[in-house]
Amino acid sequence: MSMDLTFLGTGSAYPSPHRGASAVVLRAEGECWLFDCGEGTQTQLMKSQLKAGKITKVFISHLHGDHLFGLPGLLCTVSLNCSPTQPPHCVDIFGPVGLRHFLRVALELSGSQLLFPYAVHELEHTADQCPAEGLLSPAVTQSSESLHPQERQGRTICLDEKSECYLLFEEKQFTVKAFRLFHRIPSFGFCVQEHDRPGRLNTQLLKELGLKPGPLYGQLKNGKTITLENGRVVKPSEALELDIPGRKVCILGDCSSLLGEGGQVACRGADILVHEATLADGHRERAVEHGHSTPSMAAAVARSCKVSRLVLYHFSQRYKPASLQKDTEEDDVLELLRQAEDGLRGTATEVVLAEDFLTLTIPIKRPEN
Amino acid sequence: MSMDLTFLGTGSAYPSPHRGASAVVLRAEGECWLFDCGEGTQTQLMKSQLKAGKITKVFISHLHGDHLFGLPGLLCTVSLNCSPTQPPHCVDIFGPVGLRHFLRVALELSGSQLLFPYAVHELEHTADQCPAEGLLSPAVTQSSESLHPQERQGRTICLDEKSECYLLFEEKQFTVKAFRLFHRIPSFGFCVQEHDRPGRLNTQLLKELGLKPGPLYGQLKNGKTITLENGRVVKPSEALELDIPGRKVCILGDCSSLLGEGGQVACRGADILVHEATLADGHRERAVEHGHSTPSMAAAVARSCKVSRLVLYHFSQRYKPASLQKDTEEDDVLELLRQAEDGLRGTATEVVLAEDFLTLTIPIKRPEN
Ligand SMILES: [Zn+2]
Ligand SMILES: [Zn+2]
Ligand SMILES: [Zn+2]
Ligand SMILES: [Zn+2]
C-alpha cells in the first residue's frame, strides 16, 4: 500500500503568497487525512494533485487560527463538490476541546448545510500543556446549543494516564494516537501507526512441497498451520517471510517541547517525524517565549526518538522558500536545515525542509532480521 | 481626493486559485474600507498593492462563508503587523445580526489577542429578506458571553422605516448607508455617498477686485459673504465655482433582487454600482433559486437607478478570468459582459467585468450646470 505526505502549507502565524498556513495531508490507499487546516487550505488543495472530496478524517493540533480558520470553508467546499450519487461518509474531526463549538457556530451562522455528516471528537488537555493564560474557561468552549443538523455526537477522549497517550481510533490498517505538547495553548501531536503485516508466502518452497496456489495458501497467510495430503505439516513460520513492519508517521502541532513520556514513546522509531521549526537557533529565546521550536530543538526530539526522517515545517514567514530566496536576504531557510543537520550529526536521521506542495513517499519497510 | 475600488476576490461560493472569494476595498485618502472578507482575503491583500494595516472599517454583506470566513484571520494578521508605536484605532465592523457572535467565538477559541480594539455594529434584518429557512433563531445569533477583551460595545442599527435604509454613520466626508437585499439569508447592500464640496474660488475675479490670498479667501470658501475695504460686497455665489458633487459608490451583497425602495433610492445616480452576476442569463432560474442574479438582472437594477458604471462580480467559479479563458471552454465570462451590455442598450451606463486585483478609479465629478 502506498503512503505519502503532502504539505499544503508550511508557514507560521498566517498564510502568505509564499507559504500557506499549516496543513498536511497523509494519503493512504486513496483516502486522505488532513492534519491542521489553516486559512486557505482549500485553495492549496485545489492547486495540489489531491482531491478535497477524498478527505475522510481531519486532525487539528490546536486552535490557533493558522491551524484552524480554514476548516469551516473546507467542509463547505467539500460539500459543494460532493457527488450526490455517492453515499456520504461521516467526516471524523479530532482536536482540542472547543473545536466542536467553533465549528458549530461557524457553520450555523453562515447557514452552511453539508451534504455529509461530521463528528467532532475532542481531546481533553491537561492544565500543564500551556501557561495558565492559555487555558480557556469552560464557558467559552462548551456548546449549549443542540447539534448542527449534519453533526453526529462526537466522543470526548481523555488522556490514558499510564501511556500518557490518547487513543483516537484503531482500524484495520492503522492505530492513531495523540499526545501532549507544550505551547501557548493546549497543542497535540498525532501518531499514525500502520499495523505490521504478515510477510509474503515463500511460493518457491510451497511449490517444492507440491502445494499449488489455492485456499491453503490463504490459510497459511492467515497464520494457520496446514497438513498436506502426504502428511507433511507446514507451519506459517516456514512458509511465510518475516512480518513487514508497519510504518509510523508522527505529525506535531506547534510546541516548544513534548510533554511527559507519551510523545517520546509514540514517536520512537518513526519513519517520519514532522516537527515545527518556526525560527532559527539564533532566535531560540524568542521562539520558546512564543511556544515554538528551533531546528536544533526539533533535532533533539528526532535524535532521542531515533526517527528515520525529520521534516521541518511551520517556518516564520520571514523564511522564503529556497526557490525564491535571494542572496541578499538575511533570513535563509537553508540555515534551518543546516542547524537541524548539525543537531543530528552522527545519526542516520535525514532532515528535510518542507515546502508547500512537497510530497514525501513513505516506502514500505523491509522485514526486520 | 482620490478614490478607487480594488477587487480582491470575484468568485462565488468558495475561493479558487483563479478567483478569490468576495472582497472589495474602497480606498479614499489612504484609508481602506473592506467590503466582505471571504477566506483568503488576507493573502489576496498581500498580493495587491494595498496594505491590510490601512483597513479601518469592514462591511459584511451577509454571513455566507464566502463573504465571512476570512475575517478572523484578517484581523489577527492586521494585528501582527500593527506598529506598536502607532496609537491603535478602533476597527468598526458592520454586518448582519450574528456577526458579533461569530467573531467573538472565533477570536476567543483561537486565543487571538488583537493589538487594536474593534466593535461590531449589527444591522437588524426584516423577515422578508429571505425564505423562512434562511432566518437564524436568536439562540444562534445572540452572544451571552461577555465582550472579547479587545471588543468595544457595538450598536444595533435598525431599519429607518421611512427611507427603508440603515444609517451606518456620517462623517466629515462621507455618509454610509445600508439597504436590504433578497437572498437565501439576510443580505445587505452598502452605499457610500461622498458629500458635495464647495467649488474652487474664482481667483481671477478676486484678483480683479483687488483681493489677495488670505483669510478672506477662507471665509468665502466657507460660505460667508465678505465686504472689501472699498465697500464692495462679495457673495460666495459669485466668488465660488459651482459645488463639486460628491461621488457615490454602491456595493451589493449576494441577491436575486433589491427589497423595498431603500436600495433604489440609495443607488440612484451612483458612479459605480457593484452587483453580483453569479450565472449567465441562460441559468436564470437556477440563479434565482439560489438567491443570485444574472447579468440582465444586474443590468435592470443599473438601468432603473441610472448609474454611470455597472461592475459585475461574484462569478461562479465555472467562469475563468478572461485571460485564462480557452476557446474550447463552454463558459465564457465575456458572455456575462455582453448580456449586461444588452440589458443596458440605449443608456450611457458602462459595464465592467471585475477580475481579482482590478482597480477602478472613481474620478472627481464636474460641477453640474
Ligand atoms: Zn502556528
Ligand atoms: Zn500555535
Ligand atoms: Zn456569495
Ligand atoms: Zn450568499
Image (tube, coloured by chain):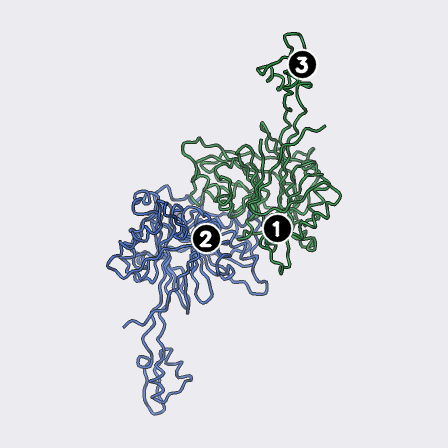
Chain colours: A blue, B green
Q: CA distance from mark 2 to mark 3?
A: 68 Å
The residue at label 2 has a CB less than 8 Å from ligand 1: no
Q: CA distance from mark 3 to mark 1?
A: 55 Å
* Residue B133 locus on image (x, y percent): 63, 50
Q: Nearer the viewer, residue B277 or A332?
A: A332
* Residue B154 locus on image (x, y percent): 53, 34
**Could you tell me which chain the residue with mark 2 belongs to?**
A
**Could you tell me which chain the residue with mark 3 belongs to?**
B
| Three-letter code for the amino acid on which mark 2 is drawn | Cys
Quadrant where the N terminus of chain A sits is bottom left
Q: Quadrant of residue A347?
A: bottom left
Q: Nearer the viewer, residue A37 or B174?
A: B174
For label 2, the SS is loop
Q: Nearer the viewer, residue B23 or B271?
A: B271
Residue at 63% of width from left, 12% of height from top?
A: B210
Q: Residue furthest top?
A: B230
Q: Is residue A94 visible?
A: no
Disc 3 designates what residue?
B234
The tag earlier along the polypeptide, 3 or 1, is 3
Count residues near mark 3 (Cα–Cα under 10 Å), then give few for <14, some for 14-19, many for 20+: some
Count residues near mark 1 (Cα–Cα under 10 Å), then give few for <14, some for 14-19, many for 20+: many
Disc 2 designates what residue?
A37
| Three-letter code for the amino acid on which mark 1 is drawn | Phe
**Could you tell me which chain the residue with mark 1 belongs to?**
B
Disc 1 designates what residue?
B315
Count residues near mark 2 (Cα–Cα under 10 Å), then give few for <14, some for 14-19, many for 20+: many
| Three-letter code for the amino acid on which mark 3 is drawn | Val
Q: Tally the marks.
A: 3
Q: Which mark is residue A352?
A: none
